[in-house]
Amino acid sequence: GHHSHQSARYRIACDDRAEDHSSSGLIVASGTGATGWARSIMEATHDALPLDPQERAVAFFVREPFPSIATGTSLRGGKLAAAPLAVTSRMNDGGVIFADGIEQDFLAFDWGRNVTLGPAAQTLHLITG
């Protein structure tokens, strides 16, 4: 998104679909992380993307996509298992990528920068008692 909370501008591509967006940003969650913000988005939009905690996939959600002459809203979310999500920044400056809601710990995501999102090759294992 944009660090000042103005609209984020980017190009999003998954499989054979691509679209320019203006939105409040993207949320990406795993099955273990889909209980907070991602769950709220699913409930508000009625777009359920169930993820099992052990599933090797992540879900993405576009926050408040804005349709215009230059931006679309048809690519709003989905499950990423085999094909990743490619995102290219269209923000001159102020674009950021951060995790777990910690905005101070960010990666710059300004014009032309690319990020590819999908499930990790390695998984974590929880060991209990």
Image (cartoon, grey):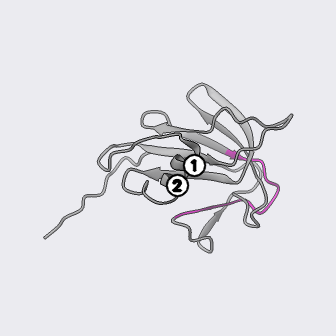
Q: Picture coordinates of residue 5 (x, y %)?
A: 74, 63
Q: Quickly name the residue at label 1.
A: 44
Q: Mark 2 belongs to which amino acid? A: Ser
Instruction: Count neighbours of disc 1 (C-alpha within 10 A) and say few if under 14, some if 14 to 19, many if 20 or more.
Output: few
Residue 92, magenta (yes or no)? yes
Residue found at the very far left of the displayed protein? 129
Residue found at the very far right of the displayed protein? 69
- Residue 124 relative to residue 35: left or right: left
Q: Nearer the viewer, residue 27 or 95?
A: 27
Q: Residue at x 60, y 40 (%)?
A: 86
The label number, if any, that marks residue 40 in the structure image: 2
Instruction: Count neighbours of disc 2 (C-alpha within 10 A) and say few if under 14, some if 14 to 19, many if 20 or more.
Output: few
**Mark 2 vs mark 1, CA separation in Å:** 6 Å
The answer to whether one can see residue 117 in this image is no
Number of callouts = 2
Q: Picture coordinates of residue 61 (x, y %)?
A: 57, 46
The answer to whether one can see residue 65 in this image is yes
Quadrant where the C terminus lies?
bottom left
Q: Picture coordinates of residue 83 (x, y %)?
A: 48, 33
Q: Residue at x 82, y 55 (%)?
A: 92
Work out whether 29 lies above or below 68. below
| Residue 65 picture quarter | top right
| Residue 56 picture quarter | top left
**Span colored in magenta:** 88-99
Residue 46, magenta (yes or no)? no
Work out whether 93 lies above or below 60. below
User: Element type at marker 1?
Assistant: helix
User: Element type at marker 2?
Assistant: helix
The label number, if any, that marks residue 110 in the structure image: none
Q: Residue at x 73, y 60 (%)?
A: 2
